[in-house]
């Protein structure tokens, strides 16, 4: 396929080969259609209407029944294994606008591979069921264009594409059947933002504490910390410092680590990166350094919700918080638009635990919101519903919650409402020190599983009602 053709003609050509396409906003990867990749089609009349309205729209292909290996420019994956790198070259190859590479394979009919981020290797993602890719001749802001590598264009229908080589298929099978591991959380999971100087020791110590709490050995903790140090810390700590952190944290028994976390032992022991003869030295950076440093945010909802950072949907009673949370769950599960406005870039697994509204109300609300999105509720298979919430101060409940998250491989967990998870607090619900102890266990669980928790919280105008902090 000639990558120099115009965008509409290219969309037509992809559709003729059998690849469902849809438009993205000019200069971006943001879908222009209401349901994102779910609106992808091979219908030439619909394609004509889309590009007549927006001739400069970028072209995207839905990757259902495909698997695309997306290798960022900074990746070193397979540089030490040229034979395997050569095996990838049997597939069509898109050279992306950000100087990355995308290998397009056919997904075997008996597989159900999903999107992953950094799970195969650092800076290597996959797009499969529930995802999409922007394709040539699309152009991003700044004028950089996607193009097909010479002699490796997408000129065959999906059924004629090669399947991934066996060693890669095995890795994809493993990722589709296993959830996050603590090593992924520490090193190469989507929430792995850069750790700047001044935060490296304390952050690695907290990660080590989380791993020790679930029984990981010193050698396992050290291996994960070494990887996190090499890939996330800027600049990396000395190897001896990392070994000291792993050894010091491993001296705690797993059931003692919670106390150490509560009393902030790790930050006290390792939070000081530099000392002088005059005492502690706090490091600062200039505004230029802040501007130039390579910090990364991985958005679950474009510009609104960051992966790995807990969020709160808060407001007084009867302000549609439950409706908003259900819309968020459905939108996140299939990469549609949240509230008809905010873009969701990829589908993930979402759990909704509701202890207040009841099954009938949740069912009616979910059906109504699904209908508003022009889909039936049963279509949203990536959402798991539960009509109970855990008590955050009870170890048995936290253990059961961990099983719920890992068993369903949840990327996002919505808990509604917050006060029902803290029964017995009374007026202490407004005491940050008391509430903080309850929320600490939820934060530790999120770090250990790689999930992102979202809390629905009722605010109130006065102080008479129990459990709810005053507005």
Image (cartoon, grey):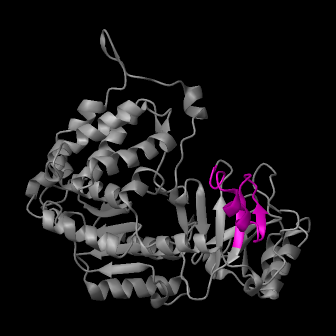
State the extent of the magenta-drawn residues as a range: 75-104
Foreground: 92 or 392? 92
Q: Which of the 4 quarters of the picture holds residue 248? A: top left
Q: Is residue 279 left or right of residue 432?
A: right
Q: Is residue 169 magenta?
A: no
Q: Is residue 195 left or right of residue 75?
A: left
Is residue 31 among the parts visible in the rendering?
A: no
User: Residue 332 appears at what percent x and percent y?
Assistant: 48, 71
Q: Is residue 80 magenta?
A: yes
Q: Which of the 4 quarters of the picture holds residue 70? A: bottom right
Q: Quadrant of the N terminus?
A: bottom right
Q: Residue at x 53, y 24 (%)?
A: 286
Q: Is residue 411 above or below residue 206?
A: below
Q: Is residue 179 left or right of residue 31?
A: left
Q: Is residue 285 above or below residue 254?
A: above
Foreground: 196 or 391? 196
Q: Residue at x 26, y 46 (%)?
A: 209
Foreground: 87 or 273? 87
Is residue 433 among the parts visible in the rendering?
A: yes
User: Residue 76 appears at what percent x and percent y?
Assistant: 63, 49
Q: Residue at x 31, y 31 (%)?
A: 271
User: Residue 138 appears at what percent x and percent y?
Assistant: 79, 63
Q: Is residue 254 above or below residue 279?
A: below
Q: Which of the 4 quarters of the picture holds residue 461? A: bottom left
- Pick out the residue farthest to the top: 277
């Amino acid at each position: 396929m000639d990558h120099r053709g115009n965008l509409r003609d290219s969309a037509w050509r992809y559709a003729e080969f059998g690849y469902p396409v849809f438009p993205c906003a000019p200069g971006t990867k943001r879908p222009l259609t209401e349901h994102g990749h779910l609106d992808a089609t091979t219908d030439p009349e619909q394609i004509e209407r889309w590009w007549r309205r927006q001739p400069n729209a970028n072209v995207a292909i839905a990757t259902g029944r495909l698997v695309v290996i997306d290798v960022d420019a900074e990746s070193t994956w397979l540089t030490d294994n040229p034979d395997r790198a050569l095996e990838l070259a049997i597939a069509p190859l898109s050279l992306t606008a950000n100087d990355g590479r995308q290998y397009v394979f056919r997904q075997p009919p008996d597989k159900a591979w999903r999107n992953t981020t950094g799970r195969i290797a650092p800076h290597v993602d996959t797009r499969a069921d529930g995802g999409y890719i922007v394709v040539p001749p699309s152009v991003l802001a700044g004028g950089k264009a996607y193009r097909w590598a010479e002699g490796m264009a997408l000129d065959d229908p999906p059924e004629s594409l090669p399947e991934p080589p066996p060693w890669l298929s095995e890795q994809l099978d493993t990722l589709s059947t296993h959830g996050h591991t603590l090593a992924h959380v520490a090193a190469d999971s989507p929430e792995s933002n850069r750790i700047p100087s001044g935060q490296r020791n304390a952050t690695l110590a907290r990660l080590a504490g989380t791993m020790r709490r679930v029984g990981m050995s010193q050698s396992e903790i050290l291996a994960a910390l070494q990887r996190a140090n090499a890939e996330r810390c800027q600049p990396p700590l000395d190897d001896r410092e990392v070994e000291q952190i792993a050894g010091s944290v491993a001296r705690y028994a797993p059931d003692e680590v919670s106390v150490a976390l509560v009393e902030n032992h790790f930050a006290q022991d390792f939070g000081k990166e530099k000392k002088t003869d005059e005492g502690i030295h706090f490091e600062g950076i200039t505004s230029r350094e802040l501007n130039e440093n390579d910090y990364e945010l991985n958005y679950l909802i474009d510009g609104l919700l960051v992966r790995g950072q807990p969020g709160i949907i808060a407001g007084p009673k009867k302000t549609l918080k439950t409706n908003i949370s259900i819309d968020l769950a459905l939108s996140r599960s299939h990469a549609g638009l949240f509230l008809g406005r905010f873009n969701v870039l990829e589908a993930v697994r979402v759990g909704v635990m509701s202890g207040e509204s009841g099954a009938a109300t949740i069912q009616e609300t979910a059906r109504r919101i699904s209908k508003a999105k022009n889909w039936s509720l049963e279509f949203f298979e990536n959402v798991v519903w539960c009509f109970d919430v855990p008590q955050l101060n009870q170890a048995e409940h936290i253990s059961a919650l961990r099983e719920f998250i890992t068993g369903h491989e949840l990327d996002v967990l919505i808990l509604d409402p917050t006060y029902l998870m803290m029964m017995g607090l009374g007026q202490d619900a407004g005491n940050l020190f008391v509430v903080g102890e309850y929320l600490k266990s939820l934060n530790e669980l999120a770090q250990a599983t790689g999930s992102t928790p979202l809390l629905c919280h009722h605010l109130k105008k006065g102080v008479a009602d129990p459990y709810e902090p005053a507005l």
